[in-house]
Image: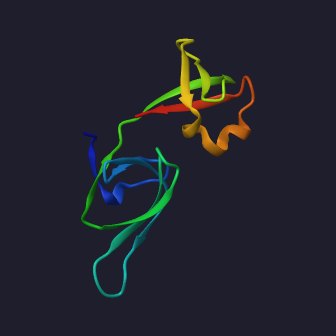
Amino acid sequence: MGEKIDINRIARDMFIMHKGEPYKVVDYEHVKPGKGQAFVRVKAKNMKTGNVVEITYKASDSIELADFEQRFAEYSYSDGDFYYFMDKNTYEMIAVSADAVKDKAGFLKEGIDAVVYFH
């Protein structure tokens, strides 16, 4: 289980957990309506499916941060089912499923630098 923080500390590019799934915060907005409680509207991308959703939290809520490991890598090649990246620190090959790469495959060229996230 990841660290919990107050929703008011949320920031873009932060990784959070929502309904047991990891999300990356794309955008957020603190809303203070004339009547009623303040709330935070978060637009977040599901790191497994790529779907972007809007989530609303009460200003008093806390959220769980998602545990991610970030590795700097270089794209090597694809065999159709997997895309292979070389870890720039350990020189280990990292296989990433084609489903995880999806629409970004067109941007991958041999030797390009990439960041690979592990959950």
Q: Name the residue nearer the viewer: 21 or 65.
A: 21
Classify residue 88 by image quadrant: top right
Q: Taking 100 as reference, is 57 above or below it?
A: below
* Residue at horizontal 35 percent and vertical 87 percent from the top: 34
Q: Taking 75 as reference, is 98 above or below it?
A: below
* Residue at horizontal 51 percent and vertical 58 percent from the top: 52
Q: Position of residue 60 (x, y in %)?
A: 24, 65
Left or right relative to 84: residue 14: left
Q: Name the residue nearer the viewer: 79 or 90.
A: 79
Q: Position of residue 79 (x, y in %)?
A: 66, 24
Q: Residue furthest top?
A: 91
Left or right relative to 70: residue 57: left
* Residue at horizontal 44 percent and vertical 53 percent from the top: 11
Q: Position of residue 106 (x, y in %)?
A: 73, 40
Left or right relative to 107: residue 53: left
Q: Name the residue nearer the viewer: 43 or 107.
A: 107
Q: Position of residue 99 (x, y in %)?
A: 56, 39
Q: How many marks?
A: 0
Classify residue 77 by image quadrant: top right
